[in-house]
Image (cartoon, rainbow, N blue to C red):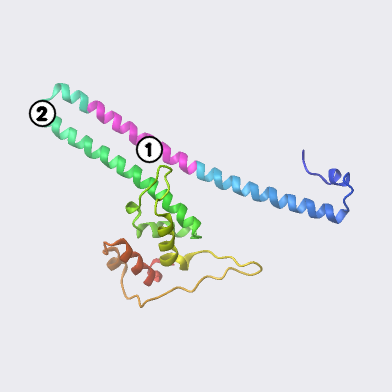
Amino acid sequence: MALTRKMLQTYGLEADKIDEVIQAHTETVNALKDEIDKEKSRADKLQEEASKAAGLEQKVKDLEKEVETLTKNSEGKDYDALKKEYDDYKAEVAKQALHGKKEEAYKELLKDAGIPEKHFAKILKYSNVDGVELDEKGKITTAKEIMKEIKEEWGDHRETTTQGGANTPTPPKSNGGGMTIEEIDKIEDAGERQAAIARNHELFGF
């Protein structure tokens, strides 16, 4: 049943109280609509990823058929080469699929830490995403430790809102900087690389 002024009047509410109820109801409905839109967008994105995964799986199946056919009709050398190609490709598909799951789990932590989505790509580039472990539910097993690292290394880019005032960004930390993007990219250790990024955050547009 729709919430109307006429219905509220039957409860004996005064006009100003009716206005307050209608306003609160409208805000609640709008908030729910926004949440629905966000979930729909996320569902569409997951559907797109699922379609890509289905395409990769089909390619693996096609390659399996080629291997089976060549097993029956070839004399070893060609079969061995194709078998290696198949094994390598299958391993790469599995690697990509696992990376995608880890990346999604990492994004959830960034979101929970209050990091704006516009920074996700840059942060993921310099984070050891492949080094995390997932549980049976697809969640990062060391979520608390990773969350702490995110807040320490990327806390300057969190969105903070204070009631009754404008957002006040935390001033960026700096330990001297002095490195170039190329030098930072060459750092193999993920922890050291993140620390270097934090010290030279202005190079990355943060």
Disc 2 residue type?
Gly
Residue 76 % position (x, y): 10, 28
State yes or no: discs 2 and 1 in contact (Cβ < 8 Å).
no
Residue 138 % position (x, y): 42, 45
Residue 68 % position (x, y): 21, 25
Disc 1 residue type?
Ala
Q: Is residue 205 visible?
A: no
> Where the N terminus falls, by quadrant?
top right
Q: Using the image, tell me which numbered label, if any, was put on residue 76.
A: 2
Query: Counting other residues with Cα less than 10 Å from the Cα at mark 1, is it few (<14), some (14-19), or many (20 or more)?
Result: some
Q: Residue, x 78% and y 44% (percent of image)?
A: 3
Q: Using the image, tell me which numbered label, if any, was put on residue 53.
A: 1
Q: Residue, x 32% and y 53% (percent of image)?
A: 131
Nearer to the camera, 24 or 37: 24
Q: Main secondary structure of the magenta part?
A: helix
Q: Residue, x 78% and y 51% (percent of image)?
A: 22
Nearer to the camera, 59 or 16: 16
Query: Counting other residues with Cα less than 10 Å from the Cα at mark 2, is it few (<14), some (14-19), or many (20 or more)?
Result: few
Mark 2–mark 1 Cα distance, whole angstroms, equals 31 Å
Please tell me which of labels 2 and 1 falls first in the chain.
Answer: 1
Q: Magenta region: which residues?
A: 44-66
